[in-house]
Structures are given as C-alpha cells and as structure tokens.
Image (cartoon, rainbow, N blue to C red):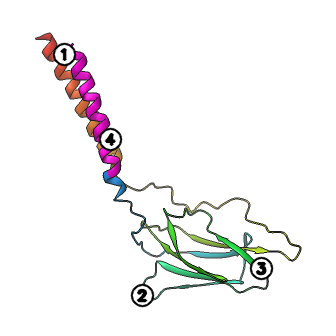
C-alpha cells in the first residue's frame, strides 16, 4: 500500500510541477514584449509583389511598421503570411488604407504584408500558400527542462519507495 501511495504521490507531484511550469513560462513569452526590427520587408497586393503598397518604420520604435495601400482598387483587408497575430505581431491601428503593426517576442523573420484588393471584375484573390519565414525555432521557454526535472524527481521518488520496500 505504501508503494502505491508513493507512486501516486510522485505522479501528483509531476502533474503539479508541469502545471506550474506552463503558467510560469507563459509570462516569459508575453505578446506585449517588443522585438528587434526585421531585416527584410516585402509588400504585396493579392500575393504579388507590387509598388502599390508603401511602408514606413516608426522612428522612435522600429518594431512598429505602417503599411499603406496606394493603388486604385478597393482594399478589403490585410494579411501577413508566415506570421501569427498575437505571437509574431499585434495590430496597433487600422485606418482606411493603412495598417500599423508591431513586431513582438523577438520576431526576426521576414515581414510580408499582403493587401487584399478587390479586382475590377469583383473578385478577391489571396496568396495561395503562406511563405515560410525561415525561422524554424520555437521560443525558449524552459518547459522541456522543467518537465525533465519533474520526471527525474518522480523517478527518484519511485526508486526511494522501492528501496524502502526491499528494506
């Protein structure tokens, strides 16, 4: 009975430690954390590179970028292929044909701003596939390390229970 209790206690410890580490490390990857500016910005209309979209970085904060559609078509929206809103960028403002975003969480990949514009025929087209940003790294939260420590602790508890049983 003591062995079962020890094993159950160690499992509860592992689950509790994992639950605490997830909430503790979530604060490390806060979406409000500004990042350094990206090295490459590409502007598109309906998935094709164009000169109908211009951009400007904020002089006080280069992580803030304003994109403006200057073409003749009707702008219906914006998309940022290869980036995830709330993880890589946040929208600061959107007014008329302009949108201002801020890069967050140390995003250092390429920024592709795609203006979705209604064609003269009344059709809206978007890019077929989002282009990968080349950043295949996940954020370093330490969750893997915390899990390894928790599993090691549970293993030690099980070994201690087995040793006491043999004595």
**Badge 4 vs badge 3, beta-carbon distance below 8 Å:** no
**For the residues marked 1 and 4, what is the alpha-carbon distance in whole angstroms?**
24 Å
Q: Earlier in the sequence, mark 1 or mark 4?
A: 1
**For the residues marked 2 and 3, what is the alpha-carbon distance in whole angstroms?**
31 Å
Quick one: which residue is furthest to the right in this view?
A: 121
**For the residues marked 1 and 2, what is the alpha-carbon distance in whole angstroms?**
64 Å
From the viewer's perspective, tell me whether residue 55 is left or right of residue 61: right
x and y percentages locating residue 156 in the rendered image: 20, 28
Number of numbered labels in the structure image: 4
Q: What element carries label 1?
A: helix
Classify 159 as above or below 1.
Answer: below
Point 29% across, 34% down: residue: 14
Q: Label 3, on which residue?
A: 74
Q: Which of marks 2 and 3 is nearer the N terminus?
A: 2
Q: What element carries label 2?
A: loop
Q: Earlier in the sequence, mark 4 or mark 2?
A: 4
- Tag on residue 2? 1
Counting other residues with Cα less than 10 Å from the Cα at mark 1, is it few (<14), some (14-19), or many (20 or more)? few
Counting other residues with Cα less than 10 Å from the Cα at mark 4, is it few (<14), some (14-19), or many (20 or more)? many
**Badge 2 vs badge 3, beta-carbon distance below 8 Å:** no
Q: What element carries label 4?
A: helix
| Quadrant for the N terminus in the image | top left
x and y percentages locating residue 42 in the rendered image: 63, 75
**Badge 1 vs badge 4, beta-carbon distance below 8 Å:** no
């Amino acid at each position: 009975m003591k062995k079962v209790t020890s094993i159950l206690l160690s499992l509860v410890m592992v689950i509790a430690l994992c639950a605490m580490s997830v909430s503790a490390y979530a604060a490390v990857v806060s979406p409000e954390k500004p990042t350094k500016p990206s090295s490459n910005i590409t502007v598109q209309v309906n998935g094709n590179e164009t000169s109908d979209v211009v951009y400007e970085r904020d002089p006080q904060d280069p992580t803030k970028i304003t994109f403006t559609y200057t073409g003749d078509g009707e702008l219906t929206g914006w998309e940022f292929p290869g980036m995830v809103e709330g993880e890589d960028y946040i929208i600061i403002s959107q007014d008329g044909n302009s949108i201002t975003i801020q890069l967050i969480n140390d995003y250092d990949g390429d920024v592709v701003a795609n203006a979705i514009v209604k064609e003269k025929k009344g059709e809206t087209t978007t890019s077929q596939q989002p282009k990968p940003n080349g950043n295949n790294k996940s954020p370093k939260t330490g969750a893997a390390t915390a899990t390894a420590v928790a599993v090691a602790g549970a293993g030690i508890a099980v070994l201690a229970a087995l040793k006491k049983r043999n004595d």
